[in-house]
Image (tube, rainbow, N blue to C red):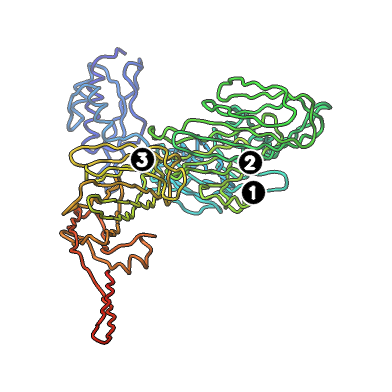
Amino acid sequence: MRVTPLSLVVSALFVISLLLGVGGIQSAPPPSLSGERGGAPADEKRPAPFSDAPIERSEHLVYVPYDRLEGVMADEEKAVIMPYRDFLTLWGEITPPVRQEEEPPPVEATLTVADYTGRIEGNTVYFEGKLEIEALKEGWSLLPLPFGNVAFTDLSLSEGVLTFTKREGTYALVLPQKGAYHLSVRFVVPLIEEPGQKVLRFTLPPAPVSRVDLAIPAEGMRIRPGGVSPWRMEGREGERRVRILPSEGGRVELLWSPEIVTPTENESRIFVSAAATITLREGLLHNETTLRFDILQAPTGTLTLHFPKGTNLLDLRGKNIKRWGIREGEETQELVIDLFEKIIGHYELGVELEGENDLDRPAVRVLPFVHVAGAVREKGIVAIRKDAGLKVVPQGEKGLVRIPFSDLPEGREDPHLVLAYRYRAAPIELRLAVIRRTPRIETIAKTHLFLEAERARIEYALDYDIREAGIFHTRIEIPQEALVIRSVTDRSGGDAIEDYRIQRSKGSQTIEIDFRRIAFGETGIRIMGEIQGARDEITLPLPRVEGARRERGWIGVDALDKLKVRTLAADRLIPVSAMELSGRDIFPKRRAILGFRYEGRPPNPRFGVEARAPKVTAEVWNRIEIAENLMKVEATVHFD
């Protein structure tokens, strides 16, 4: 039988009849025409009558001879001829493929990667973690996170609201939908103190890739992990880091203890106790350290010290020193001391260092310390002193603990002492901010004026009260160019004043005084001067101290008895009696007929001077003798 395109037409007609409600037996989707060579008799069954039962659609591929096409078409009530490809499209729309149920994932969510970094502060370890999570289930899912012996301080999720619930005795993270998530965690773990060692022990959620990176600050310590977790040590001494790959159960355990040094037969064991005093001055930093050695096991003939670069060695004190030399290292200077004879037992060494303390360059200063190379143990105390004009603010320390001043040797009652520390192991570090203070100056000026016929003598006694910071010089203005300065001295009679200079300009003069030592606290200056040609009127110049925050003063006026003094101008001056001046002992061994006090900088007072008219008092004694025809008179006159 020859297959013709008629088969395409007949198949299409039969499909259209199915679309109009012809029932049959359900079958698989139609195969392709290109694979068929033979044919089967056409199924000539009529469609089943209409019923309420669901329609079961089926399709059969029928091949008929070309010459019987007219008969086949006559038996069909309705028919539409279309391409077979279009028929397949229509058939697929009314017969959707059978849905196959997806197999659910074996777990709802999984932790794929976990990285943790930690640092030790005191007896607490601070961790930060980055966790990569994959939610496999459509919709809501739970991921248990069995952390153990940790306390969370912060949690954040890359998407959605961070939510936890309890599941199987631990916390489980609630994930809203399928996909990838990033969880950031911060938590702390306590260090456990055990005899001879410290233990870090906690549990992490298991993950295929999990790493713990922990910085270990201790030096001279033997570190080992507990359990069988793979680990390795990285970094140099003082910067060591431990990398641990947690075990399958997520358990992390780390132990460290003092490293046991087994000395050889000729190896010395050196123990050091240090006492360092660091003094901060204007432009200078001074370190004086006393090292007390206890040398055990074997004698030694060489001692090696380390101190920072940029620091100069001023002095080295100790017995049995043969020679010493300094070698420059990468970060420190190495002082090698050779001894005449080897020593064992107790030995004492004094070291003085000096460094720069430039206050014009504001910066945090790292203080220089002396350390002994090869010491089994080094402990000590540190005392920080400063000059009065400086302010010291701690900015951080390493290996140091603050202590009260009473814990220093002999109490160390020192007014310049500001900080005290103790340390149990080296190295140590102390950072300070050093700030220059501004002096706070208050003065009391006691001015005494003594008037003579054509001359006025003036004495200034200035009492300084200097706080916050000391001063090396001061400037005093005398607003009177006619005043001749005779002397400038230390009021206490000492040698505090090294030199002074006088500058005159525009009817005034300024006295610049240099102190031999920094002046702080109470300081006194005495200035003696005179004005020539003072007759009828005189203006008393009051001293003014440059930079003083508060100025107060007393004025006392005296004159020869033959001179009469009156006040012409005394603006902002408060009169006081001569009795008050004497009672306060303002002008010792000086008389005052007029007195005033003031605060601030009042105008200079003016006084008038005139000669008194002579006042003569006479006392006359008369002696009269009367005789016969005679009277004798004798008069005696007493003048005042």
70 vs 511: above or below: above
Q: Which residue is mark 1?
A: 409
Between 173 and 479, the residue placed more toward the observer is 479
Q: Answer yes or no: is residue 466 visible.
A: yes
At which x and y percent is residue 549?
Answer: 30, 51
Q: Is residue 20 left or right of residue 496?
A: left
Check residue 232 in the rendering and tell me which mark sits there, or answer none.
none
N-terminal label among 2 and 3: 2
Tell me the crowding category of disc 3: few under 14, some 14 to 19, or many 20 or more residues within 10 angstroms, Cα based: many
382 vs 335: above or below: below
Q: Which residue is mark 2?
A: 275
Mark 2 and mark 1: Cα distance apart in space: 9 Å
Q: Amino acid at mark 3?
A: Ile
Between 47 and 617, the residue placed more toward the observer is 617
Q: Amino acid at mark 1?
A: Pro
> Which element is circle 2 on?
strand
Q: Answer yes or no: is residue 136 visible.
A: no
Between 633 and 183, the residue placed more toward the observer is 633
Q: Which residue is mark 3?
A: 513
Between 275 and 621, the residue placed more toward the observer is 621
